[in-house]
Image: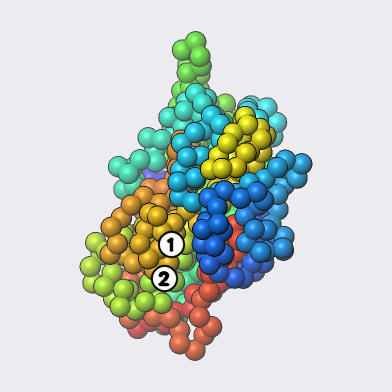
Amino acid sequence: MSGVSPTETLDPARVRELFDLRSSYNAFMGGGYQEDPYPTWHRLREEAAVHPGVVHTLTGYDGQAFFAGLPFEDRPHFSAFSYAACDAAYRDAEVFASATEPVDPNVGSPNPLNSMLSMGGTRHRQYRALVQPSFVPNKAQWWIRNWIEQTVHLLIDNVVDQGRAELNVDFCAAIPVLTITGSFGVPVDQALDIRAALSQPDKIVGMIKPIVAARRESPQDDLISILVEAELADEHGVTQRLTDAEIYSFVLLLLSAGSGTTWKQMGITLTALLQRPDVLRAVSEDRALLAPAIEEALRWTPTDPMFSRYTTRDVDFYGVHIPEGSVLHLCLGAANRDPARWDRPDDYDITRTRRPSFAFGGGVHVCLGMHVARAEMRVGISALLDRLPNLRLDPDAEAPRFVGMYERGATEIPVVFG
Ligand code: HEM
């Protein structure tokens, strides 16, 4: 078996240094935003389903948030705030494309955008079909058994005797990176090196390269082995294996799409529960309530409340004329609290009738890793409830708040237990 061996340990000081919260909410994603955007998003949705402009400016944030503006400063921007408008855009991937132009992972240097995320049509379908089997709900146990469970317990081992912890960094942060790198066949000590090199694709490729070569020689029970054996059929039905370049871009996509997201979303879920001790107790006593608690947190406060689409032709959309080549921001956070779909949308209520939300996006690009993310959150939170009795927010520390514009998450989550 690959991944974390039970004898390995995680150096808590290194984890804290690598997952420092101050650097994790960065300007690129509007990390300076400290308010609650939902009242403004309600007002904007009531005024119109679609507005000209970008989400952060419309929300009244004039700090930095490059994610939304660059590299498209020269294109017109629009933003959708209703569930119906986001749904319509997600359903029509031909008019509302995921990228401004087609990508080819074999051209240019490996990077997360040079991947299925930016592909459309048949090509996207073919690439996605290759990897989908490793990410279906039935594969959750494969991820849990091989990588998630051991990582979660290593992290709890570090705090269990201390009576207190800061769950955002001591716990939530490292689980997704170690899960993904574990699935690549990278041992824990090197996994932390990958985290350290997260903004340097060349370095990461350097670490993955020998693994790809080794798995081409002798496949194992891990994701890189599945990728090296996968066959892609071209339009003439001729099959080919993925090139190293295609595998590298996919690896970089998984690291960038699956790490910060699951970290922040697990912290949001824990915060929602810790701030409602009755709900936390109910979930602790009946673990069947954990899945609805996670789903409701995804709806109520999705960590990524905005994704962009690019119009491939002129379109009249919810009363607004959007010219070809425009950027349309889908404000998924606003859509997830649309009162046309959910009663009392601002309430975090784990007993509400579950209806799919847009926390994982929608349409053909719906999150590939959603079942892995759910498994990480479920196993992680359940293990905390099992091993840290009487878990509660530290009454002497500052209470957690949600911050950030395009990547939202909790400030510190200080807890005591025992
Ligand atoms: C709670 C955690 C997560 C959230 C909230 C999240 C959210 C999303 C969203 C909203 C999209 C759609 C983007 C769009 O519309 O353009 C997406 C796509 C994607 N996500 Fe996630 N994600 C999470 C975890 C993960 C994990 C753990 C992985 C991998 C192990 C992953 C891999 C991907 C990939 C590969 C795509 C692109 C799919 C495609 O283009 O067909 N995500 N994610």
**Amino acid marked by disc 1:** Trp
Looking at the rendered structure, the secondary structure element under dot 2 is helix
Q: Residue at x 65, y 52 (%)?
A: 54
**Horizontal arrangement in the rendering, residue 134 relative to residue 49 (left or right):** left
Q: Count all numbered tags in the image, as a single digit.
A: 2
Q: Are marks 2 and 1 in contact (CB under 8 Å)?
A: yes
Q: Is residue 63 above or below residue 309?
A: below
Q: Quadrant of the C terminus?
A: bottom left
Q: Residue at x 56, y 31 (%)?
A: 95
Q: Quadrant of the N terminus?
A: top left
Could you classify mark 2 by the number of other residues whose Cα lies within 10 Å: few (under 14), some (14-19), or many (20 or more)?
many
Answer whether residue 1 is visible to the viewer in this image.
Answer: yes
Q: Position of residue 382 (x, y in %)?
A: 32, 65
Q: Is residue 104 above or below residue 343?
A: above
Q: Residue at x 72, y 63 (%)?
A: 63
Answer whether residue 215 is visible to the viewer in this image.
Answer: no
Seen as rendered, the residue at the extreme bottom is 396
- Mark drawn on residue 300: 1
Q: Position of residue 80 (x, y in %)?
A: 55, 49
Gap in Å between the C-alphas at discs 2 and 1?
A: 10 Å
Q: Residue at x 51, y 58 (%)?
A: 46
**Amino acid marked by disc 2:** Ala
Q: Nearer the viewer, residue 42 or 143?
A: 42
Asked if ligand 1 lies within 8 A of label 2, the reply is: no
Q: Position of residue 47 (x, y in %)?
A: 55, 57
Seen as rendered, the residue at the extreme right is 74
Asked if ligand 1 lies within 8 A of label 1, the reply is: no
Q: Is residue 165 above or below residue 241?
A: below
Could you classify mark 1 by the number of other residues whose Cα lies within 10 Å: few (under 14), some (14-19), or many (20 or more)?
many
- Mark drawn on residue 6: none
Look at mark 2 in the image and give the residue it sits on. Answer: 272
Q: Nearer the viewer, residue 145 or 9?
A: 145
